[in-house]
Image (cartoon, coloured by chain):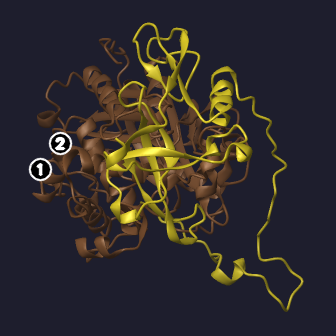
Chain colours: A brown, B yellow
Amino acid sequence: MYVKRMKRSNQRVAVVGAGMTKFVRRAQETSKELSWEAAHLALASCDLTLDDIDAVVIGTAPDAFDGVHMKSEYLSDSCGGWGKPVIRGYVGGGTGVFAAIQGWYHVASGLFDTVLVVCEEKMSSCQPHPQAAFLTIFDHTTERPLKPNLLWIFALEMNAYMHRYGLSKRDIATVSVKNKRNAALHPAALLGDPDITVEDVLDSPVLAWPVQRLDVSPVTDGAVALVISASHVARRVTDKPVWIEGVGWNLDTAYWTNRDLSYPVYVEEAARMAYDMAGITEPRKEIHIAEPYDPFDYKELHHLEGLMLFDKGEAPKAAADGVTQRDGDLPVCPSGGLLGVGNPIAAAGLMKVGEIFWQLRGEAGARQVPGNPRRGLAQAWGDLMQVGTVIVMGV
Amino acid sequence: MEELVYDSVYLRREDFEERPDSTQEPVLFETWDPNAQYAWDAGVAIGRYLQDLKAGRLIGRHCPECDRVLIPPRMFCESCFCATDHWVPLEDTGTVLTFSRCYVTWDMVYLEDPMMPAVIEIDGAAPGMGIMHLLGDVDPDALEIGMRVEAVWKPPTDRTGAITDIAYFRPLEPAEE
């Protein structure tokens, strides 16, 4: 359990550039081509070239998606890694935000001035369904003989959450509607839909009750990249640096059937670490915009509670009351999230960090949150329902 | 942001299909059976767990520091980070902590009769100590969190020392409680 007071680095670190590909169901580009596009766009966004990059962080989820072992080495050229210090981080679905955290500590440590962070996922290659890549996350002796699939753990967790707080499917479906509507204004989104309704979600096919098709984010291909710099470089590169003020990550036990699945305590621990580093004592007042991880609609609510932005069991009511709408008191997933923009696993997490960057710079175009938000957070989640990764950024 | 547009085509649905009029494989498609075979050691704790499953019993391990009885059993307590100290026989009954009705396989083939996975808190273990298993002999729509269930064991001659030696868990009749 996190109890330590965070030490702060003397080296201030900022995100100075970001780029992303379109998120699509099946990209014509290979995973290398997608990675290069995102990296190229991120560098171009801050007028830097690869010569300005001291080290590269690559985030990409299971090798099995591409059928290429040690995928980050395979991707390294397209991520700008040739002849540079390169590292791959991998914490399942939490990878996208964790890669940004790794970029932060590369710079905060004083080792590097400018780091390129590239996250890529091409899920469509894996046939007949990329869920195959997840079948081996279960214990080989005590679980796999029961023939589990990935949907089970989400369904089991969602049911535990609904039961604990007496929630209905309707309470939760509002999240899917909000995010798919938000994504309709995102130029890179796969599943934006301005007209979707709660009834559409409730009428969609049941996959693993209580999970229905429109409760789930889609299989997606895409890539996202960020440029992260030390303060002396950041101030030279841009007049709108977005400072990384706090980071946190935390892992729960892998004995997942021994946990209380109704509350993500590991997200709370990760958030406490990040808030502590950022000097945040009242997150509900000090966080203006949030991009929690939403691979399933209930997960957004679950994570908002873990992030202590709402009381336990209260996030659904806030969502129903419009608090989390783009023009609400706490805009949540103004990008459209994984449910709307799409879920290329590692890239989806980094997209959330990119969204906070664009929102805080006032560059989010039609999806810009009103009121000049000055501080936001992005959060991702993964491994065997057990990791929380949190980043707090401000201007 | 700059938009990159290429003069090339996306894969289409027909690119994935066999073409009876051609000896050509579907475009860019490779079927690969990885020669990935694993001989897993059951280990000390799960080895004993499997032996007991074969004998029709559930068993846990006790932690001397937090006093929890752990299932699945392990030789160390992940919370106290100390060695567990002895075996504790458990009941083969328990309480449904959460469940699902799953209508699809991993590759999205629809199932007429849903699989009913659950996390079942085992009687005699510490509170919240559940295992994943399947529910059966029950109307899928009658499932409830908090439902009391019992293991349905395979006949002794069919048991192999595996978690599947329990065929499934079914509701306990109220009279039996």
x then y, percent, for residue A37: 56, 56
Asked if residue A20 can be seen in this view, the reply is: yes
Q: Chain of mark 1?
A: A
Q: Residues within 10 Å of mark 2 (few under 14, many from 20)?
A: many
Name the residue tied to disc 2.
A288
Q: CA distance from mark 1 to mark 2?
A: 9 Å
Residue projecting furthest to the right: B23
As displayed, is residue A45 above or below residue A13?
below
Image mark 2: chain: A
Nearest to viewer (mark 1 / mark 2): 2
Label at residue A6: none
Q: Residue A82's x, y, as percent?
A: 70, 38
**Element assignment for label 2:** loop
Residue placed under numbered mark 1 in the picture:
A371
Instruction: Give the left or right position of residue B37, taking residue A190 as reference.
Output: right
Circles 1 and 2: CB atoms closer than 8 Å:
yes
Of the numbered discs 1 and 2, the one sitting upstream in the chain is: 2
Vertical comparison of B148 with A152: above or below: above
Q: Name the residue located 38 percent from the left edge and 37 percent from the top edge.
A: A15
